[in-house]
Image (spheres, helix red, strand yellow):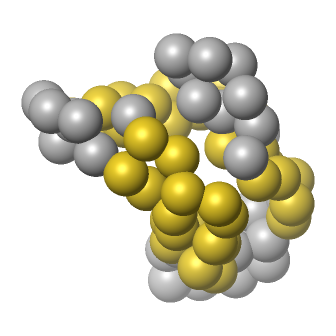
């Protein structure tokens, strides 16, 4: 797995890639200590298809229908 974080002021994006096919149905959005409540809105985008399996706000475990990547 490889990750890439690209902050841009108060916004940014994270890219996660795997070396082989994988099925994903949950992610865990975490905030660093002392930053509780700083994450606003977010969305998960499948870069291969453009589909958005989930969107919302705040941190925590996010579940969505399984997506093969």
Is residue 31 shown above or below 46? below
Horizontal placement of 4 versus 44: left or right? left
Question: What's the residue at 50%, 83% (across, down)?
Answer: 33
Question: What's the residue at 13%, 30% (across, down)?
Answer: 19
Q: Can residue 26 be seen in this view?
A: yes
- Point out residue 42 in the picture as x, y percentages from the top left corner: 78, 49
- In front of the other: 49 or 38: 49
Horizontal placement of 5 versus 49: left or right? left
Looking at the rendering, in which quadrant would you find the N terminus? top left
Image quarter of residue 45 = top right
Question: What's the residue at 64%, 72% (across, down)?
Answer: 63
Image quarter of residue 65 = bottom right
Question: What's the residue at 52%, 46% (across, down)?
Answer: 67
Looking at the rendering, in which quadrant would you find the C terminus? top left
- In front of the other: 10 or 18: 18
- Point out residue 31 in the picture as x, y percentages from the top left corner: 56, 72
- In front of the other: 60 or 21: 21
Q: In the rendered picture of this protein, how many numbered marks are placed on residues?
A: 0
- Point out residue 57 in the picture as x, y percentages from the top left corner: 85, 64
- Point out residue 9 in the picture as x, y percentages from the top left corner: 72, 30
Horizontal placement of 29 versus 10: left or right? left
Q: Is residue 31 visible?
A: no
Tell which residue pokes out farthest to the left in this image. Answer: 19
Is residue 11 shown above or below 30? above
Is residue 57 shown above or below 1? below
């Amino acid at each position: 797995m490889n990750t890439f974080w690209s902050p841009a002021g108060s916004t940014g994006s994270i890219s996660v890639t795997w070396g082989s096919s994988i099925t994903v149905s949950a992610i865990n959005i975490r905030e660093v200590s002392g930053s509780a409540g700083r994450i606003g809105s977010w969305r998960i985008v499948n870069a291969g298809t453009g589909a958005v399996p989930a969107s919302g706000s705040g941190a925590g475990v996010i579940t969505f229908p399984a997506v093969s990547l």
